[in-house]
Amino acid sequence: MPRAFVTGASGQDGSYLVERLLDEGYDVHALALEGEGAASARVSTHVGDVADVERIRALLLDLDPHEVYNLAAVSSVARSWEEPDLTSRVNGLAAAALLESAFQVQERHGHAVRFVQASSAEIFGEPTVSPQDETTPIRPINPYGAAKAYAHLMVGVYRQRGVHAVSAILYNHESPRRPPHFVTRKITAGVAAILRGETDTITLGNLDARRDWGWAPDYVDAMVRAARAPRAADYVVATGEGRTVRDFVTAAFDYAGVTQWEQHIKVDPALVRPADVTDLTGDSSKARAELGWAPTLSFEDVVSRMVEGDRANS
């Protein structure tokens, strides 16, 4: 039975990944912080902090996994401004330590370990070209992107060292499992609350920020395909369609049957980040050609599923 080790298993992507690996018959081991649980009782959960290098290394050497997926992260750009030191440790240094652990597993047990780092389009900062691909210069402009950039570069270092190390450069991807503090869930949960008469407004920041929004299970599929590809490489995972936050708001209200949505939106300058990227849109041609990957849902379908999920959870 193949064995996989997943960090960040309790998050949006981690929950979908764990479910998929279990369906494929994997022996799944998940790292979780105290108080967090894995998505299934069939998962072997190990309580610990990904930044606890010595403990996690000993755990991996003991488990001897065939695949390692590093999804653990301080996942909020806004939080990275509040806690840049923590973000550096978790998103950057811990990823490098996991790569070294995977290398040591290979050396001790004599088999390949396939390693996937969940990277981010934030490594590109404020790009001068759109859409971005794997050759776009790495120039992050926030602590989150800088830490992810370090981890991304370390993937390349360990690939040269013989690890099947992959950096999946994930653009924004959503689902009903997206935590409520993210702007997309804030929008869809707000629309559902307005429909129930519980509130009348949604308070947001920059409505003009443009992102490339996809469906989270599709992006998990890309990571699994990259892990099992014959050749290790970096891949942009994106739909190729850039939409603004305003577009997301419009789609959510349209699905709910509300046409005059402006009266329900309040813009708070305090919610605008210190340095906010204006346009992140990805070119996933390489992933489509080499992995046979493609998104399965349109932007409108992603938004509607999220609104429906929040309506159902009322």
Image (spheres, rainbow, N blue to C red):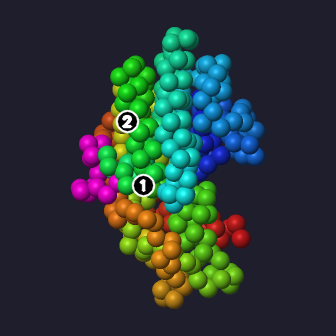
**Do we see residue 9 in this rendering?**
yes
The question of residue 295 being in magenta is answered with no
Q: Is residue 22 left or right of residue 135?
A: right
- x and y, in percent, of residue 160 in the image: 35, 22
Viewer-proximal residue, 182 or 232? Answer: 182
Secondary element at tag 2: helix
Dominant SS in magenta? loop
Marks 1 and 2: CB-CB under 8 Å?
Answer: no
Rendered position, 301 above or below 229: below
Q: Is residue 132 left or right of residue 179?
A: left
- Label disc, if present, on residue 142 of the rendered structure: 1
Name the amino acid, label 2.
Leu
Q: Residue at x 65, y 77 (%)?
A: 193
Judged by depth in the image, the label closer to the viewer, 1 or 2, is: 1
The question of residue 127 being in magenta is answered with yes
Q: Residue at x 51, y 74 (%)?
A: 270
- x and y, in percent, of residue 131 in the image: 28, 55
Mark nearer the N terminus (1 vs 2): 1
Q: Which residues are magenta?
A: 125-137
Label 2 crowd bin: few (<14), some (14–19), many (20+), radius 10 Å: some
- Classify the position of the N terminus by image quarter: top right
- x and y, in percent, of residue 228 in the image: 45, 29
- The residue tagged 2 is 153
The quarter holding residue 288 reads top left
- Label disc, if present, on residue 51 of the rendered structure: none
